[in-house]
Image: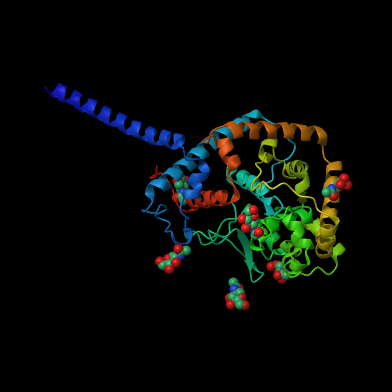
């Protein structure tokens, strides 16, 4: 009699355990299989207002399910990451340099900086580097205050944040001296694009063709620049981009160029993206996989012809930018010339890797970590990393999931 009841009890416990495990796995599989892709998941996550979160309650009560899902996904990504990191370690790549972990990417507007920005965040996430993020969760800009302190996201549970590894953001009021102190030993990286194209891109990005009612012209940007009616708008709109690199007033451009050249370890050129990425790889001692990219924010517009009349207007206003571009296009090719290795061959390897990975990701469904990470854009990364860092510094998540 006693034996039987023990037996029944055992069966019950085993059954309960089975149901529990089944449910857990079910949630996990459901998470993986759900038609939501990772983009939507992160997009749908409510803004995490870390500023008001208590350390002891890392997850807010409301919207708990969604948050749990997100944390679960994050755990999953981390787990996968550990495995693949192990794999790369075992792959034993012969390297005679140590990968750089500290960098500052001063991400300029309308240069394709988002593509590089996302790639850098991906590297940071994969290698558990600590990102300095904008102070406001909704902001995309990092900014010093009073020229003396870099304002970044604070976590409530630590008074003094540990040393940051990197920034991959727009930076307002950029000040080299200050940022050099902010992240010691950082490699400084920025980007330049043909100023005419950069301006064209800004024009459409700001929807000026719509607000000025130019959308029915065959080349709205041309009409804007060359039609006398818009002269005032042009005067207001077309301004040098160089203030993004600090120094609103550039008195002696040639001297400033030499200074930029010293300050920046690499100025990438949008028109030579892949070449630039190879130089980035060399500078940072990273791998080909690290620099595989996904073109972000493609507008879908075909670049239109820049007529000589347009050039005339633009040269007049973007003279400094053009000189800056030419200067750093030259240094780029100088670096390519001095590349340590067979540049052409490395470019071939990189391009085939790039084609293979983006090709396979274009057909692959979501929920493939490599592709999911590849497709994430900068705002998604910021949101994810904000949360990862919160969990790293402010609490253990063992009770969740
Ligand atoms: C933080 O909480 C205070 C009061 O509880 C509120 O006034 C403030 O708007 C909150 N800040 C954020 C960023 O949510
Ligand atoms: C920044 O400057 C303002 C006004 O000049 C001052 O009130 C404020 O205390 C300064 N903040 C810091 C952090 O120095
Ligand atoms: C840049 O930062 C340094 C170091 O904090 C400071 O001494 C300098 O005044 C700043 N320059 C500007 C233009 O704000
Ligand atoms: C552009 O063309 C469409 C259709 O041809 C017309 O409906 C619209 O009013 C035009 N817009 C302007 C700003 O002229
Ligand atoms: C950049 O520099 C290279 C090498 O000097 C030159 O061939 C190329 O035309 C330049 N590109 C642009 C867009 O000016
Ligand atoms: C989280 O847990 C690990 C071990 O379980 C511990 O080493 C670490 O200090 C904990 N972190 C925090 C922030 O409590």
Q: Quadrant of residue 20?
A: top left
Task: Please tell me in which quarter of the rendered image ligand 1 is found.
Answer: bottom left
Front residue of 54/184: it is 54
- Which residue is at 69% across, 45% downward? 100
Q: Is residue 160 left or right of residue 203?
A: left
256 relative to 47 in the view: left or right: right
Residue 383 location, x and y as percent?
Answer: 53, 51
Residue 389 visible from this viewpoint: yes
Q: Quick one: quadrant of the N terminus?
A: top left
Q: How many marks?
A: 0
Residue 244, x across and y down, in percent: 72, 62
Residue located 83% across and 42% down the image:
336
Provide residue 372's location: percent of width, then percent of height: 56, 39
> Residue at 60% across / 50% down in the picture?
378
Tell me the quadrant of the picture where the C terminus can be found: top left
In this rendered view, identify the residue nearer to me: 240 or 125. 240
Tell me which corner region of the image, top left, top right, bottom left or bottom right, holds residue 122: top right
């Amino acid at each position: 009699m006693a034996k039987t009841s023990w037996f029944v009890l055992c069966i019950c416990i085993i059954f309960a355990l089975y149901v529990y495990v089944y449910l857990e796995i079910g949630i996990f599989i459901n998470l993986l299989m759900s038609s939501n892709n990772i983009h939507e998941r992160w997009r749908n996550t409510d803004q995490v207002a870390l500023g008001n979160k208590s350390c002891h309650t890392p997850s807010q009560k409301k919207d708990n399910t969604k948050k749990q899902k997100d944390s679960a996904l994050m755990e999953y990504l981390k787990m996968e990451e550990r495995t693949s990191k192990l794999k790369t370690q075992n792959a034993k790549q012969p390297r005679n340099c140590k990968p750089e972990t500290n960098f500052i990417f001063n991400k300029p507007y309308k240069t394709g900086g988002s593509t590089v920005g996302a790639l850098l965040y991906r590297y940071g996430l994969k290698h558990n580097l600590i990102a300095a993020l904008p102070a406001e969760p909704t902001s995309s800009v990092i900014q010093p205050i009073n020229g003396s302190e870099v304002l970044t996201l604070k976590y409530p549970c630590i008074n003094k944040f540990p040393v940051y590894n990197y920034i991959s953001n727009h930076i307002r009021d950029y000040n080299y001296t200050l940022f050099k102190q902010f992240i010691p030993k950082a490699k400084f990286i920025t980007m330049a694009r043909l100023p005419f194209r950069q301006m064209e891109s800004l024009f459409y990005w700001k929807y000026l063709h719509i607000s000025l009612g130019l959308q029915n012209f065959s080349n709205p940007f041309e009409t804007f620049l060359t039609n006398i009616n818009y002269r005032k708008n042009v005067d207001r709109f077309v301004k040098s981009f160089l203030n993004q690199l600090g120094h609103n007033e550039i008195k002696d451009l040639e001297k400033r160029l030499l200074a930029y050249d010293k300050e920046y370890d690499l100025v990438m050129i949008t028109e030579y993206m892949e070449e630039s990425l190879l130089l980035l790889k060399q500078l940072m001692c990273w791998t080909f996989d690290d620099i595989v990219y996904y073109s972000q924010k493609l507008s879908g517009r075909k670049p239109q012809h820049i007529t000589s009349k347009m050039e005339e207007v633009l040269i007049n206003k973007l003279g400094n930018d053009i000189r800056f571009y030419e200067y750093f296009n030259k240094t780029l090719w100088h670096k390519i010339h001095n590349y340590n290795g067979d540049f052409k061959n490395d470019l071939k390897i990189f391009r085939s890797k790039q084609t293979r990975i983006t090709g396979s990701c274009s057909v692959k469904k979501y929920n493939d970590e490599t592709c999911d990470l590849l497709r994430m854009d900068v705002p998604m990364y910021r949101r994810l990393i904000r949360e990862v860092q919160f969990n790293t510094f402010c609490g253990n998540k063992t009770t969740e999931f």
